[in-house]
Image (cartoon, coloured by chain):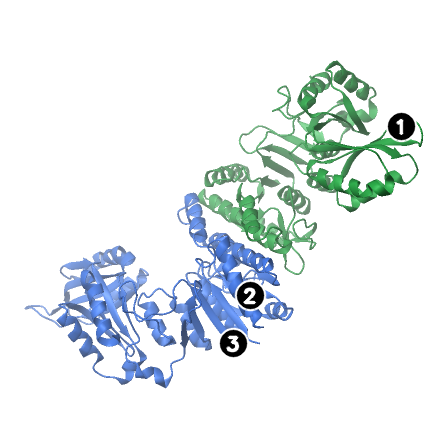
Chain colours: A blue, B green
Amino acid sequence: MSLIVQKYGGTSVGTAERIKNVAARVAKNRGKGDQVVVVVSAMSGVTDNLIKLAKEIMPLPNEREMDVLLATGEQTTIALTAIALHAIGLNAVSLTGAQAGIVTDGVHTKAKIQNITPKRIHELLDAGNVVIVAGFQGQTIEGQVTTLGRGGSDLTAIALAAALKADLCQIFTDVDGVYTADPRIVPKARKLNEISYDEMLELASLGAKVMQSRSVEFAKKFGVVFEVRSSLNDNPGTIVKEETTSMEDIVVRGVSLDKNQAKVTLVGVPDKPGVAARIFKAIGDANVNVDMIVQNISHGRGTPATDISFTVDKPDLLKAQKVIDSLRAEIGFGDVISTDAIGKLSLVGVGMKSHTGVAGKMFDTLAREGVNIEMISTSEIKISVIVELAKGEQAMRAVHTAFLG
Amino acid sequence: MSLIVQKYGGTSVGTAERIKNVAARVAKNRGKGDQVVVVVSAMSGVTDNLIKLAKEIMPLPNEREMDVLLATGEQTTIALTAIALHAIGLNAVSLTGAQAGIVTDGVHTKAKIQNITPKRIHELLDAGNVVIVAGFQGQTIEGQVTTLGRGGSDLTAIALAAALKADLCQIFTDVDGVYTADPRIVPKARKLNEISYDEMLELASLGAKVMQSRSVEFAKKFGVVFEVRSSLNDNPGTIVKEETTSMEDIVVRGVSLDKNQAKVTLVGVPDKPGVAARIFKAIGDANVNVDMIVQNISHGRGTPATDISFTVDKPDLLKAQKVIDSLRAEIGFGDVISTDAIGKLSLVGVGMKSHTGVAGKMFDTLAREGVNIEMISTSEIKISVIVELAKGEQAMRAVHTAFLG
């Protein structure tokens, strides 16, 4: 008898019919004698509607009240899922985040799980129930309703799997697993059987939309092996786990393209100590997250000057430009050139640690395609380049062919 | 400084715009320096939609899960109402039934309030907040979500007013108060300035839809004076309170017509001890509520036999007929005549206790109108008659004119 935690996202529970499908899938596992904990999200569209309703009343609603409001979405789904299990003859009990013993800090709308007391879940499982837990939500020690922010239901599932010492954690979604690249862009992309936490983290941070980084980080920290798989079929998914030696044989695990980046270049920045620090401290103070930074070598005559380029998330571009403008008098740079017509193309693979020549092969591939590289950034298991947005998908296909066939 | 409990029903909070109106009304009271506790229902239509969704999955869903499901309706409204108060600059905090300290028994979908610990509400009020409490819901001592059944939000408001020792309890609804009769049927009906608990109870049990009996009973038991008034205007409403001597000067407070009744007549029932008991025990065992019972005097030749008529709620008619059929062999009666084409017309007034001639005047009025009386039932403060449904409204208008102008 195994203990399985299964998480179903908003699309998988989007209608009464789909909730019945979830119940049927759970029943299969129960039929094998497994204990099952089901974590569900709000039905697709529900959370957005609640947010819209709140914003009709006030553009920037209070975060404590948003948590009270949004927590109703998952609470609705747990009850309906329990009813769907009853309908096919299974014993099932729903639990809100609070009832499931999920205690968080008090940072509303993006609370962190502090601890989970799974006593009640164990009791209900041992009494023969499927236990349905509301994802995305918890409660402070003082009894305030909290939510965990984007990707919160995945986090609930992985944290529960850790707390319950589950044998298996399955994240059901609307794709078959993690792919070598987005199949909508790269038709030759194929599903991976396994991927390491670190590779998954790089892919998540690079804009591959399968899961949020924080859930993967949590899984890595607590050693929770999980499977990403489809709720629409019975295909095996992708196992996400600590890297093994055999994984290093594969140099490149996947290719990603992040179109949500924008680039700012400051031309003619005085080349003296402390200037870069001043710029990026000001941008950080404005809560703008900087991804890549490139400082070119000094050039020109007269006062030594340099060009500094950096990338930010597209929605933060205006804010970043404002910060830069406010620094002009103080620092005295020349032109500021911004563009959001860029894409960040990345290769990810733990095998890069022990293989050389990956960067060279990537740059060569791009050169042959006539794709200009505007910025480069590397880590132990990743190489990212900024390219012209219009050529991003073509570049991605070429690089995928070169490394992954 | 007064402490006021205000309850707003589903229509009053049915849209974002209406929730803003509620906030504006609350702000007026805060402007006078009053402390305000607001109890809200689910937005109109929300509860019905949730029930529909659950029944799509299973016709008779589990009641514990229905409570988890339905409690989301009020939880949504409290958050939106708090946000609406923030939007106009007031401090406000929402509380679920559980957070407000409302402890109930464990009878899901129709739980009874066992006690209220209003400590947290008092603290929040004293800190300058409007406190918004989810109506209709509570929590068992073990932490199970419960709901209070029909009219539950009124009950929450009145119970909170008692627990908080509020100075005033206002039930906002979509009518101006309690009327001498339903104005849609009796155009001359007028709003009452005050009414006693007992009169209100009789009107509620007679089908006047303003409030459920249980909330009025609770108010009577704990001496909570409350006002029923409209959320759509500033007209004063109807005060509901313990009867005073002056109230008895008014013989008839109101007239009601209940169209939700059906009548069953058993012809030729053997007139011997124990037969009526056998019949009504069987009907009671089937959970069918019998309202009026009339047994005519024996007639006919041969074995002494009698006719027995009784009324039940229309939806229970089929069930009652089945019970009667099952008794036929055992008891041996003749025909069974059923009809749901009846109306129960009632006069209510505490003044009847000390005034004579009310029944005579009522019967005389009906006779002049050519309305036949099929059954009669009386209490200290009420006279009810069963009449032909088609003549019910005409009869109601005539009786209203005779007693109330």
Answer yes or no: are tags 1 and 3 on the same subunit: no
The CA distance from mark 1 to mark 2 is 63 Å
> Which element is circle 3 on?
loop
Q: Name the residue under label 1.
A: B297
Identify the amino acid type marked 1. Answer: Ile
- Camera-nearest label, 1 or 3: 1
Quadrant (top left, top right, bottom left, bottom right) of the N terminus of chain A: bottom right
Identify the amino acid type marked 3. Answer: Asp
Which of marks 3 and 2 precedes in the sequence? 2
Where residue B42 sits in the image (x, y, percent)?
55, 44
Residue at (42, 44) in percent of width and height: A56
Quadrant (top left, top right, bottom left, bottom right) of the C terminus of chain A: bottom left
* Residue A139 in view in this figure: no
Residue under mark 2: which chain is it in?
A
Q: Name the residue under label 2.
A: A27
Q: In this view, does A315 lie to the left or right of B71?
A: left
Q: Mark 3 points at which residue?
A: A167
